[in-house]
Amino acid sequence: MSVPLLDISRQYDKIKNELNRAVTDVLAHGKFILGPEVKELESKVAHMSGVAHGIGVASGTDALLLALRAVGVGAGDEVITTTFSFFATAGVISRLGATPVFVDIEPDSYNIDPTKIEDAITPKTKAIVPVHLYGQIADMDAINEIAHRHNLKVVEDAAQAIGAQYKNRPAGSFGDLACYSFYPTKNLGASGDGGMIVTNDDESGELCRMLRVHGAKPKYYHKIIGYNSRLASMQAAVLLVKLPFLNEWSRKRIAHAEKYNSAFADIPEIVIPTVKEYTTFHIYNQYTIAVPNRDALMSVLREKEIGFEIYYPVPFHRQECFAKLGYKPEQFPICEKISSEVISLPIYPEMTVEEQQKVIEAVRTAVG
Ligand SMILES: *Cc1c(COP(=O)(O)O)cnc(C)c1O
């Protein structure tokens, strides 16, 4: 690959000694599951999210699963979410026996369109799951206003948005609960799977703490049936080393995004990412452009060995596993168009000036 979509090893090269020491410390103390590093990470991530509680779990997917359980989602309920996200967002709703209800996206942010949420509400609706796609927070004031009026719970899928801000408020502070993923490709990535739920609500926090250990409290006493979803101390140790760099890394991503934006400004066919007026910090987990002839761009990028990915080629309403929900593509005109045009380009913090120049030239040749 001349320019990979992401090269995680470069991050390791820079903080090798700290990471090695942190991992060795865990090997030495032997408290591998929910150990002291997990507690410290929970308190730091809760603090940066402006809430009281952090609950470390095994993945971002599990964070969503447990958070939805904690707000009472179960069989017969409906949960409203975007049709345009990573599969986990919708999958967890079905796994709880509830029905995901999909809503189209905004044509500029590609996040759930709040003006289309109310039409999707029925007496069975229990919760709304907005996703902060690519690192830009969804329009949370509008979403929370609707949720409040209809007495619905809100669970933020902040898997791609740790450290992002909306009207100067951090991701994780808007929903009843919010969920992070520490999957290695996320802005704060572990060396394996990991996730966290954050919440300001004492009761929900306690419930999530029980749910991650089979519903036990105290140990071996089960009032409810939970899951095995514990965060490993090794992962928390890695994340604690990386956390102080998160802001700097996100700023480097922003700098790369701004460079791309100005390099593509004179090509009308390229739609650069829209930063909404309420977005005070977009963390660019992805830098995603939209182009009318994506296939042509993809073949040039392949030929020049430049990494790219389509997030996401198949929206939820067109997934085979959701066919029984009976959606028609015409119900999601914005997503239908956008999902055929988006393409994400390399934006990792360690990308060099020369590498970015290669990407820019390839895109300009293919599209311009
Ligand atoms: C990554 C991601 C998840 C799932 O996180 P995992 O840690 O991979 O389980 C959920 N939602 C979104 C939007 C994601 O990007």
Image: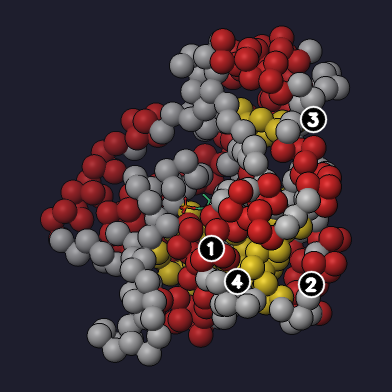
Spatial separation of the CA atoms under disc 1 and disc 4: 9 Å
Q: Position of residue 151 (x, y in %)?
A: 74, 82
Mark 4 vs 2, N-terminal side? 4
For image coordinates 56% across by 15% down, the residue present is 302
Quick one: 67 or 177, which is closer to the camera? 67
Residue 243 horizontal side relative to residue 367, left or right: left
- Secondary element type, mark 1: helix
Please state which amino acid type lies under the numbered disc 4.
Ala
- Residue 313: quadrant of the picture: top right
Please state which amino acid type lies under the numbered disc 2.
Ile
Discs 1/3, front: 1
Q: Residues within 10 Å of mark 2 (few under 14, many from 20)?
A: many
For image coordinates 45% across by 81% down, the residue present is 207
Query: Which color scheme did the rendering employ for the protein?
Result: secondary structure
User: Which residue is denoted by mark 1 in the rendering?
Assistant: 92
Please state which amino acid type lies under the numbered disc 3.
Val
User: Which residue is denoted by mark 2 in the rendering?
Assistant: 121
